[in-house]
Amino acid sequence: MAFWNRAPVDRSLPKDDRGSGSFDDYKYDLLPSNARTTVRLANSAPCQEEIQRIVDSGESELETAISRRSIEEERTDAPMDIRLFSGSRVTGVVGTIPRGLEPVIDEALGRLDRAGKKARIPASVQKTKNGWRVDLLIGQTR
């Protein structure tokens, strides 16, 4: 991976909770290279109780409940908090987009909107040795 393709690392978070994703997984226009492309959310450690509730509910079809960033959010470089649709309810915050990958999410939401689809990115919850983590299945927005 070339150094210019890496998203900046948020060193204020523990190494095991910084999320993951790479610009190498996307074509020039931020279209995911394949249907298996994912982005793992950062800052999920403080959200373990909320993620546990999602797992306990047994809901298997999860989608993001986010909107595109406003100009003010872009200007202040605010973190992009992620909530999920679980069944018919919206969950609390389950993590944030890893620093630098916000344009990938904005482009995916715009692509879904232009296609006349709901602006929701499919998600899944994974158990890791460091607790529950949420992956956005961004490759499915192609």
Image (tube, grey):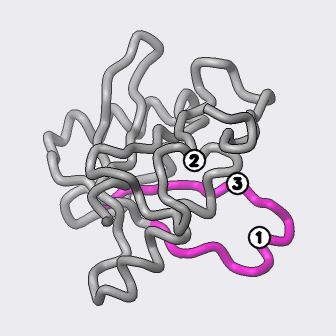
Q: Is residue 124 visible?
A: yes
**Of pointers 3 and 1, the one earlier in the residue sequence:** 1
Residue 88 at x, y percent in the picture:
22, 66
* Circle 2 residue: 23
How far apart marks 1 and 2 lie (CA) works out to 19 Å
Q: Going from the N terminus, do you reach mark 1 or mark 2 first?
A: 2
Mark 2 neighbour class, 10 Å CA radius: few under 14, some 14 to 19, many 20 or more: some
In which quadrant will I find the N terminus?
top right
Three-letter amino acid code of the residue under disc 3: Pro
Side (left or right) of 55 relative to 17: left
Which of pointers 1 and 2 indicates the residue nearer the eye? 2
Task: Indicate which label's residue lies in the foreground, 3 or 1.
Answer: 1
The residue at which mark 3 appears reads as 79
Q: Residue furthest top?
A: 129
| 77 drawn magenta | yes
Q: Residue at 56%, 41% (x, y): give it.
A: 22
Viewer-closest of 91 and 63: 63
- Left or right for 136, reference 3: left
